[in-house]
Amino acid sequence: MDILSNIPPHLFRMIIAVAVVLGFVFANATVMGYLERKLAGRFQRRLGPMEVGWHGILQMPVDGIKLIAKQLIVPDNVAGILFYVAPLIAMSPVALPFLVIPFAPGLQVIDLDVGAIFVLTMISFNTVAVFLAGWSSNNNYAMIGAMRAVAQNIAYEIPILLSVLAIGLMTNTFSMKGIIEAQKSIWFIIVQPAAFIMMFICSIAETNRAPFDLPEAESELTAGFHTEYSGIAFSLFMIAEYTYMFVNCCLVATLFLGGWKGIPLPFGDYSSCIWFFAKVYFLMFVIVWCRWTFPRVRFDQLMNFAWKYLIPFSLVNLLITAILVKLL
Amino acid sequence: MKKYFSDLVTGAKSLVAGFIVTFKALLSPVVTVQYPREKLPVGKGYRGHPILILEDDTGRPKCIACGSCMRLCPSQCITVQGEKKEGDKRKYPTVFQVDFTRCSLCGTCSEVCPVAALEYSDVYGLAGFTREEFQYDLLADLPGLVETGFKPVSAD
Amino acid sequence: MTPQAVSKPIHYRYFINMGPQHPSTHGVLRLVVGLYGEYVLSLEPVIGYGHRMQELMAERRPWPAFLPNTARMDYACGLPHQHCYLLAIEKMLGIAVAQRGEYLRVITTEINRIVSHLLWLGANLLDLGAFTPILYCFDDRENFLDILEDVTGSRLTHCWYRAGGVLNDVPADFADRLRAVIKRMYGRFEIYKNLVTDNIIFQKRTKDIGIITPDLARRYGATGPVLRGSGIAYDIRKSMPYSIYPQLDFDIPVGEQGDCFDRYIVHIEEMRQSLRIIEQCIDRLPEGEVRTKLPKKMTLPPGDCTFSVEGARGEVTYYLVGDGSDVPYRLKVRAPCFSNLSLLPELCEDMLLADMIATMGSLDLVIPEVDR
Ligand code: SF4
Ligand code: SF4
């Protein structure tokens, strides 16, 4: 008991949180992997995985075991340590945003003043990982994929930030909890529809999902930046991708869809996290829906779209918000 | 400037139309079957590997070992030998081998057979590990194949 | 948006080897692509991985024995090849074809064309990164293939035409089943329109991309939808009519400027026209024999003979030389894909990598046909 009382409760909470979060990261990747394959099947009028378990429900765990058991093939001439580090960099920062995400009232590890900004910062680590992976693989396809990823993520981070800023102007805080509290009367999706749409589009681009999946465009670049990765290294990238998707959707749900807010549920405070997850998984569903509907855009069109449409629009949006906030 | 905005509107509309198509697909029934468990019936005219037809009354092959199929097979994958045994009215085949690795399922053999003794099975999805597995001895396989539910379809 | 031509510091060029197992080279084509950034500076197709000496095989065996091979030239659309070979043989030997047989040949050829175009549609969209349309295409394709399977005995490598007609008559419910499938197919175009044609991303990816000028197309001898996409209404079915095509009413769709989008539109329109042709043929399908009786052994007279038909990818020509025996002395096949592929290097200079893939996809290449 002595030791426990010496540990600051704050730290203790953090450790538990990290364990839970890491567990959740894997669980989310499993669920999303399964849902994505199932949905892809249904969008294409087939059944998707059906063999392992009831309606293929065990497909993803089995795949995971297979990927872990697989030999990690490392080609000659890769840039040594960086090649191994890249999947880890993709994977590790992904846990941190969970610390500031409010799943329900009181179900938040720590409420930072700059919560939203912190999430965005952590998300952008993905770029570093993708670039390292592509560059260290010593493969032309991977290199092109890496270059694309960097240019794309830089371009798309600007409109995201500008949209978040518009929210910040209205709420006077970047604390995730504060933003949700500010949506007591009305969700920001109604006040700021343009910012919502732009932010959502950017999240898709930011997570390299189709139709913006240029870094891994398989008809052009075979597998893009992870061409040379196999086994668990490859699956780390995949898990990271699903987690970034989840975090991005959390951010959008918090900023625009009122986070945990919804019709009050009769099982105590924590139960309103059901609303939160419902919103987040709905957004993820839309992202999956996008992927299985549209062709891929071309690289310069992607950049054009960011610089000619999204950035001017979000600037105008920010300006209007600022003026209105000042006047009202 | 006008084009700039009209592009945006038409573009958004077209994307929504795409969304609707796939969403309808999501709600409509699937068109595939779970293959090894459910199988669709094979088309009536489907040509699997060649098989021999039996005479109804005697249960022996109709083939008279004339060798036309062997000669005219484009892939030269049929080997027929026959002899007239004591007490038989005609020649019966003693060897009837098909090298299925080379068969192109062209339909020539049953077409040229003067007594319509060759037909095609409806067996598909054949796989094996060695080439030898596909050296079919039609005389040996004969009863087995008939029992798999093969119903001959007249070639003409 | 056409990417501007870049200045070409040749020594910065780096190479990627696309294929023979690249996802978008459809078969065993290898492209040696020299890139500067993402711009294609040079492109060199390497062919021959699927070479099977088809023409030599024809010169070693009696002519009927080559029939199964013809369908294996172009695995996606084999029947026009078989049709062409037989028409050449029939012309040489002076065989009259049974009317019903000829109608059935045309019906199945057109079904095969639709099947092939649907395959192209799906594969081309896969190159553009749309995963779903190919499954819808395969759904439609299955319906047609089921009919073909019932009639010809196989789904892909058909061997059903015979000198003087076809092997056997069609099942009794053939016409009704075909009508039902055609009706369904007309309805499906709406889906493709909403999902693909009107889609802004698809349009941006294909409009003004990979423009084949009529001059370029002519110089390389491109045929088929590639040529018609450039606005030249050249279709063997109309310009050198054969078989029963002169009696049928159909149009030749052409594009305007020859970009990938025009080629897409031409493909879609051709499917409609093929449906029209099939409908007319089933309405007029004559009764009677499907095949004329021929003597057992027919030798090819000395002399030569050329015949062209319109395959799904362009002009298929068989050139046949006989020397008095029943083994052809020489057989030469003109496969449309070879010419269509050969214009790719000139077309793709200074293009973005992604556009190069889109353009190559729109050419509808079937590599076994190139390699033979
Ligand atoms: S189907 Fe053709 S290739 Fe096969 S055995 Fe008969 S004749 Fe020979
Ligand atoms: S052609 Fe018919 S009868 Fe002659 S050997 Fe072949 S199967 Fe027997």
Image (cartoon, coloured by chain):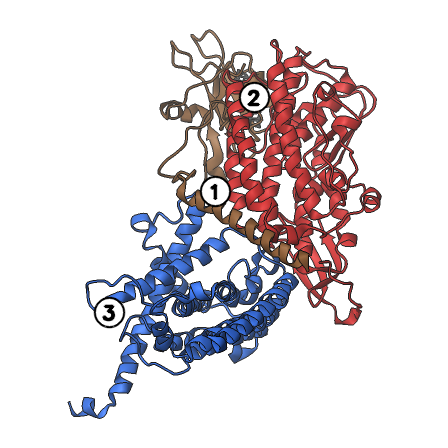
| Residue at the spot of label 2 | B109
Q: CA distance from mark 1 to mark 2?
A: 25 Å
Image position, residue A52 (x, y; %): 33, 51
Q: CA distance from mark 3 to mark 1?
A: 62 Å
Mark 3 residue element = helix
Read off the chain for label 3.
Answer: A
Q: Are marks 2 and 3 on the same chain?
A: no
Read off the chain for label 2.
Answer: B
Give the answer, above or below, for where B128 lies relative to C277.
below
Read off the chain for label 1.
Answer: B
Q: Could you tell me if residue B42 is visible in this image?
A: yes
Q: The chain shown in brown is which?
A: B
Image position, residue C101 (x, y; %): 64, 16
Which mark, residue A189? Answer: none
Q: Residues within 10 Å of mark 1 (few under 14, many from 20)?
A: few
- Front in this rendered view, residue C365 or C8: C8
Q: Are marks 1 and 2 on the same chain?
A: yes
| Residue at the spot of label 3 | A270
> Chain A, which colour?
blue
Mark 1 residue element = loop
Quadrant for ligand 1 reads: top right
> Chain C, which colour?
red
Which mark, residue B130? Answer: 1
Which amino acid type corresponds to the residue marked 3 in the rendered image?
Tyr
Q: Residues within 10 Å of mark 2 (few under 14, many from 20)?
A: many
Task: Select label 3 or label 1 by which is in front.
Answer: 3
